[in-house]
Structure formats: C-alpha cells, structure tokens
Image (tube, rainbow, N blue to C red):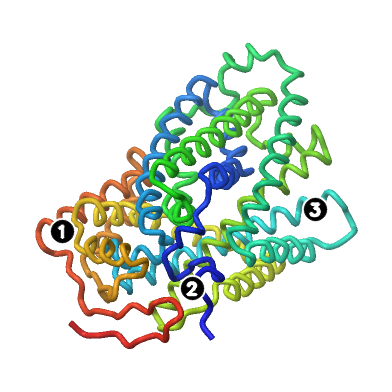
C-alpha cells in the first residue's frame, strides 16, 4: 500500500497547509545548519589571513550573496510546497534533468554525512579512549542520526531545539575561556597571523561554504507559511550563524595565531571542546541525510517510475553512509564530492530564471497549486537546460576570477534566459506525473 504523503514527509507531494510551521521554529533549524563546526573553521581560516575588520566585510558580503539566493529559491519552494529535486521537474530540468539533480544531491550529501560521522567518531574515541574503536563509533553516531531523520522534519526540529542552544553555550564558554587570556582591543586591531587574504577571496570562502545548502533550501522552506517568513528565517538564521560563530573563529585565530580551531578548543577546554565538535556535527548531519534521502527518492521516482518510502530510503542511506564511514572509504572521495559541489550552483540559476523570467512551465505549477496536486505531466528532457548546466558548471570549475560559485549561478541564469528568448527551452517527450498514492503511469510521447 502506498504511503500517505504526510506520513512520508511529503517527499513526492506538495506540503499541506496544516503541516506548515512557524518561521522561528524553522529559523532554529536554519541557524543550526549555518552554525555548524565548519562555520567555526571558516572563521578561523579568515582570521588567520585577514584583519578583524576585513573579516567582518567578507562575512557581510558573503552573507548577502547567500541570503539573496536562499530567499529567492526559498520563496519558490515555499510557494509551491515542493522540495528541490521535485520542484526541478517544472523549473527547467524536466524529469531526466530532475533525476540527475536528485542523484547529485543524494550522492553528495550522503558522502558528507559519512565524512561528518567519521569526524564525530574520532572525537568520541578521543573523549573515551579505548572504550570502542573508531569504526564502532562511526556506526553508533551514524545510526543515531539516521533514527532521528527517519522520524522526519519533526524529529529534526526536536534535535535542533536541543543541540542549537547547547552548541551556543559550549561555544560561548570556549570563547570566553580563550579570549580572556588576551586583550580584546589587540585582537580587533592586530594584523593577520598568516598569509594575507583579500576581501574578495574571503567573500568567496563565505559564499562557497554554504552554497550547496542555499541551492537545496526549498527542502526546508516548503514548510514555511509565507514568503515573508522565508525572508525572516533566512536573515535571522544566516546572519546570526555567520557572524556569531564565524567571527568567534576569527578572534580565536588571532588569539592563538593558528587556523586549527578544533585543536585550540580541545586543548584549551578538553571535554567541553569535544562536545562542541559532537553537537556541531550532529545538527548539520541530519540535514545531510534528510536532503540526500529526498534526492534519491525523486531520482528513483523519475528514472524507474517507483515511489520509494522516504523513511525506508533514509534508513538504507544512513546505514550505507555509516558503514562506509566505519570502513574509512569516504575520505578518499573528497575530490569527487568537491566536483559534485561545483555542479550545484547553476541549478539555482536555472530554477530562478525559469520560474521568474522564462516561465515555460510556470502555468502548470500555478494551475495545479490551486488544487493542491502536482502538474499532470512534466517534460521528459529539456536539452537546452542540460547544456546550460554543463557549461556553467565547467566555468565554475575552471574559471577562478571573482567568486566561482556565484559566477556559475549568474552565468546559468543569463544563458537560460537567452535560450528562452531564442525559443530553445523546449521539452522533448512528456511524462505523466505519478500523484502521491497512485500507481506509476507510463511516459507519453509528444
């Protein structure tokens, strides 16, 4: 029997109005996503190569870039009530392109899920040496996150409500402990302890550090009640996450003259520092697994015509990611995951250009939204989109003038709009959409 859309967290359906949540609750999750340990490390990287004032400017400019992308993509996700991989079918990609988007999301984020699990496992082993080997901690940590994510958005909200305040308290403790040893005015005015970074380079680091999270922001904002709520939660969550955690890392780097914040934290405050590592990875790893499961569910749905259970898919991916982390294999895939990350930015550019400018399939979304269903059909393949996606990704990978991730987003938007004006944005083939709870239907030819 097919699962009811709500019981499967609306993985292949629009989010129902009654399932939407208050913006502040989602802002807590957004803050938890932004204020991960990686943000701490990013701040240390900037602090090691920049003055405090220049680091503030880098965070400001980078945050503005991220918030604009998050707000625009997030408003589309909120209005349509659809996750990123599902929304892509009618925002330029068609079923084949959307399946590739879902696969890229699934592979990339399950990879990072495994890597984060391995980092936490090493911390647990250091916290309790000799109790269990690292591979066993990998399994325990990974399966714990899997159990929480299997519950769905509600379970992740519960996790964020606990870990976000705890993380802030622990980070505050570590900052006060370390910074009280140094005059604050010296830290604010001292030169960078390492090789100098330009403001442009720092801005690129800030924007690039969360660009994948910006692209898949619809996975979160589809639960918002209005576009204004999307803007409020984004501004509050991202601004606080970037500045509070990021600038703390900047000050710590100036205080101790290194960018290795994890070593600083664990050596200066021991047990509490290790808890910071654990809470910092725990509250980002749930979103890695959640969006990965949504991506894979949509890939299988569009490619094989089978509607998988999001819960079952989450469990399978969580087990696979945990096992690979325990085996130590995922550490070898970092370069591959980095390449996948380059392919993400153009996705946002294409979706924005299609939804707001070209509007080739906007009418289908508008008509079905009024009925609370998915459009009756979707284009099977959109060749122009695949070409724009490929070209923009290659530019992002090989051209390093300015901010590569932003260059590829803007280029994708421009190329897609031009293709639309020239009449090149056309679907080849048509596929009937499987509505939630129904049996898959065969694809139709134009």
Q: What residue is disc 2 on?
A: 297
The residue lying toward the viewer, choosing from 79 and 108, is: 79
- Looking at this rendering, what residue extends furthest in the left direction? 422
Q: Which of marks 3 and 2 is in front?
A: 2
Which residue is depicted at the point 62% across and 37% down?
40
- Looking at this rendering, what residue extends furthest in the right direction? 130
Among the two numbered marks 2 and 1 on one chain, the one whose residue lies closer to the N terminus: 2
Which residue is depicted at the point 53% across and 21% down?
51
The residue lying toward the viewer, choosing from 105 and 445, is: 445
Q: Mark 2: few, some, or many residues within 10 Å (few <14, many ≥20)? A: many
Q: Which of marks 2 and 1 is in front?
A: 2
Residue 62: image x %, image y %?
43, 35
Residue 29: image x %, image y %?
58, 47
Q: Mark 3: few, some, or many residues within 10 Å (few <14, many ≥20)? A: many
Left or right: 123, with 210 as reference point: right
Residue 119: image x %, image y %?
69, 53
Q: What residue is disc 3 on?
A: 124
**Can you tell which quarter of the image residue 402 is in?**
top left
CA separation, marks 2 and 1? Answer: 30 Å
Q: Mark 1: few, some, or many residues within 10 Å (few <14, many ≥20)? A: some
CA separation, marks 1 and 3? Answer: 52 Å
Label 2 secondary element? helix
Left or right: 270, with 198 as reference point: right
The residue lying toward the viewer, choosing from 248 and 351, is: 351
Callout 3 touching callout 2 (CB < 8 Å): no
Q: What residue is disc 1 on?
A: 419
Label 3 secondary element? helix
């Amino acid at each position: 029997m097919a699962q009811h859309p709500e019981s499967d967290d609306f993985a292949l359906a629009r989010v129902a109005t009654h399932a939407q949540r208050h913006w502040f609750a989602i802002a807590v999750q957004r803050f938890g996503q932004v204020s991960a340990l990686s943000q701490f490390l990013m701040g240390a990287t900037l602090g090691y190569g920049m003055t405090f004032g220049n680091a503030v400017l880098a965070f400001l400019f980078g945050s503005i870039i991220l918030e604009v992308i998050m707000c625009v993509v997030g408003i589309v996700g909120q209005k349509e009530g659809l996750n990123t991989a599902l929304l892509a079918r009618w925002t330029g990609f068609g079923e084949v392109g959307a399946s590739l988007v879902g696969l890229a999301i699934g592979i990339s984020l399950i990879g990072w899920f495994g890597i984060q699990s391995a980092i936490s496992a090493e911390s647990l082993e250091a916290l309790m040496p000799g109790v269990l080997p690292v591979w066993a901690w990998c399994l325990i940590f990974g399966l714990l996150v899997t159990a929480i994510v299997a519950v769905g958005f509600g379970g992740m909200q519960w996790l964020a409500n606990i870990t976000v305040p705890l993380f802030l308290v622990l980070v505050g403790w570590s900052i006060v402990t370390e910074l009280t040893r140094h005059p604050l005015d010296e830290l604010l005015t001292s030169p960078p302890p390492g090789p100098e970074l330009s403001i442009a380079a720092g801005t690129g680091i800030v924007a690039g550090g969360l660009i994948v999270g910006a692209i898949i922001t619809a996975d979160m904002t589809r639960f918002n009640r209005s576009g204004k709520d999307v803007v409020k939660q984004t501004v509050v969550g991202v601004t606080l996450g970037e500045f509070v955690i990021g600038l703390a890392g900047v000050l710590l780097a100036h205080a101790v003259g290194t960018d290795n914040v994890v070593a600083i934290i664990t050596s200066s405050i021991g047990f509490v520092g290790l808890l910071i590592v654990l809470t910092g990875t725990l509250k980002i790893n749930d979103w890695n697994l959640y969006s990965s499961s949504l991506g894979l569910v949509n890939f299988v749905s569009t490619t094989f015509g089978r509607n998988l259970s999001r819960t079952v898919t989450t469990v399978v991916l969580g087990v696979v990611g945990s096992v690979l982390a325990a085996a130590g294999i995922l550490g070898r895939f970092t370069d591959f995951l980095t390449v996948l990350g380059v392919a993400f930015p153009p996705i946002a550019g294409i979706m924005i250009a299609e939804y707001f400018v070209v509007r080739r399939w906007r009418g289908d979304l508008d008509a079905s939204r009024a009925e609370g269903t998915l459009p009756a059909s979707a284009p099977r393949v959109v060749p122009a989109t695949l070409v724009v996606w490929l070209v923009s990704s290659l530019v992002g990978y090989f051209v390093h003038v300015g901010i590569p991730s932003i260059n590829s987003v803007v280029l994708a938007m421009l190329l897609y709009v031009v293709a639309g004006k020239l009449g090149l944005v056309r679907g080849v083939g048509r596929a009937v959409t499987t509505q939630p709870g129904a049996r898959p239907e065969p694809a139709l030819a134009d």
